[in-house]
Image (cartoon, rainbow, N blue to C red):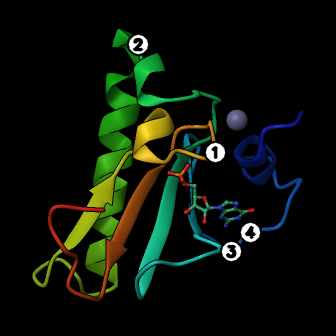
């Protein structure tokens, strides 16, 4: 198994795991771009947002709600935070296993770079 996030989800590669359940794992990003930078990752391999199917509705909902829960637990619910799915080359996706970035703790510029 060569996929980085499949390996992390299977505990075959080290990561700082901040939440885990049947469907998801949430880890600290190894190169944080803000005081809070976690990744919400489905345990099942899905390469990009383009590969989501109708049956994945609940999974995506769980990912977004988990992002909100982690942000709230860290005190960012009212201040604000950002959730991002990068998809493919021009968005800068580098790991081709679906993940939702959750960033907070500083002013995040708009439009993004
Ligand atoms: P992407 O560019 O695909 O949207 O985001 C991939 C993210 O995964 C990047 O923010 C990068 O820092 C993070 N990342 C890459 N390799 C590792 C790793 O081995 N461990 C952790 N925790 N994060 C990683
Ligand atoms: Zn994978």
Q: Is mark 4 within 8 Å of ligand 1?
A: yes
Q: Secondary structure at mark 3?
A: loop
Decide which of 40, 66 is in the foreground and name it.
Answer: 40
Decide which of 91, 103 is in the foreground and name it.
Answer: 91
Upstream in sequence: badge 2 or badge 1:
2
Residue denoted by label 1: 95
Q: Is residue 73 left or right of residue 25?
A: left
Q: Quadrant of the C terminus?
A: bottom left
The residues tagged by marks 1 and 4 sit, at their Cα atoms, a distance apart of 15 Å
Q: Secondary structure at mark 4?
A: loop
CB-based contact (under 8 Å), mark 2 and mark 1: no
Residue denoted by label 4: 15
Q: Is residue 111 left or right of residue 45?
A: left
Between disc 1 and disc 4, the foreground one is: 1
Upstream in sequence: badge 1 or badge 3:
3
Residue denoted by label 2: 53
Residue appearing at x 36%, y 56% in the figure: 66
Q: Is residue 47 above or below residue 19?
A: above
Q: Secondary structure at mark 2?
A: loop
Q: Is mark 3 within 8 Å of ligand 1?
A: yes
Quadrant assignment, res 36: bottom left
Upstream in sequence: badge 3 or badge 2:
3
As drawn, the label of residue 16 is 3
Decide which of 3, 73 is in the foreground and name it.
Answer: 3
């Amino acid at each position: 198994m060569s996929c980085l996030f499949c390996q992390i989800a299977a505990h075959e590669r080290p990561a700082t795991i901040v939440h885990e359940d049947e469907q998801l794992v949430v880890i600290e990003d190894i190169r944080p771009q803000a005081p809070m930078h976690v990744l919400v990752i489905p345990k099942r391999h899905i390469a990009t947002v383009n590969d989501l199917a109708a049956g994945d509705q609940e999974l995506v909902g769980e990912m977004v709600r988990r992002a909100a829960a982690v942000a709230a637990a860290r005190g960012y619910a009212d201040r604000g935070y950002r959730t991002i799915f990068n998809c493919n080359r021009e968005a800068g996706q580098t790991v081709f296993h679906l993940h939702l970035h959750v960033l907070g703790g500083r002013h995040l510029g708009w439009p993004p770079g």
